[in-house]
Image (cartoon, helix red, strand yellow):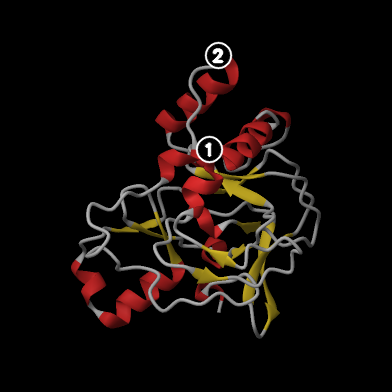
Amino acid sequence: MMHPHTCLKWVNDEIGFGVFATRFIPKGTAVYVRDALEVRVERNAALLKNPAYHDIITKYSYVDSKGDYILSWDHARFVNHCCKPASLTTGYGFEIAIHDINEGEEITDDYGLLNIEEDIPLACCDSDCREVARPSDFDRYAEQWDVTVKDSLSHFYLHDQPLLKFLDAPILQQLNQYLEKGTPYLSVRTQKYEPKDRDTDLYFLRDRKVGSAVMERSE
């Protein structure tokens, strides 16, 4: 579920749709949460063997740490990539704003955290665009992402959190224990999917192309 102060807008013919802030959203705000309404398609689901459904599922979903497809029921599925994103995935089941997001600004994330298994060409407007999102990005940038997420989490209770009520109770408890008592932090690495056999486990992200920092999930 996306933050309530967001909306879907058409970006251009190359990128397609994107998600934009309708009000100022401060750093440390949860901008997306994996709520109970999200559709989970298990990795071995028969539905994935149907080409028509397979294409839709892989186009609009992301893959979680179990290897299952998470298909958002709202406009969260249209969030685009940026190599300098406005938000990052955390180990706590939500994405957090890593800087202040101004009204009208696009809310982006990093596809390197979405368990991609094949290289995806990128064309960010950012001058430091990586040009290609790779499966190895998860390991390569995890430490850097954790530093950024930790810094953003330190702002978590300084602002209104309209998505807080949708967090799973056990996860919320872990988050509070980390923020209040300094218990172990849940790294973004906890979100990584480790397929048992990479040679036979390549259901998703085949034949995808990113134009101007967007996968087909935005068209």
> Where is 86 relative to 177, above or below?
below
Q: Residue at x 64, y 50 (%)?
A: 87
> Which amino acid type is marked by label 2?
Lys
Which numbered disc covers residue 181? 2
Closest to the camera, between mark 1 and mark 2, is 2
Q: Residue at x 52, y 47 (%)?
A: 140
Across the whole image, how many numbered discs are drawn on residues? 2
Residues at marks 1 and 2 touching, judged by CB atoms closer than 8 Å: no
Image quadrant where one finds the C terminus: bottom right
Which numbered disc covers residue 219? none
Looking at the picture, tell me which residue is in the foreground, 77 or 91. 91
Q: Position of residue 34 (x, y in %)?
A: 46, 48
Looking at the picture, tell me which residue is in the foreground, 188 or 73. 188
- Callout 2: 10 Å neighbours few (<14), some, many (20+)? few
Q: Residue at x 68, y 77 (%)?
A: 10
Q: State the separation of the CA atoms marked 1 and 2.
A: 21 Å
Q: Residue at x 72, y 60 (%)?
A: 128
Note whether residue 42 is visible.
Answer: yes
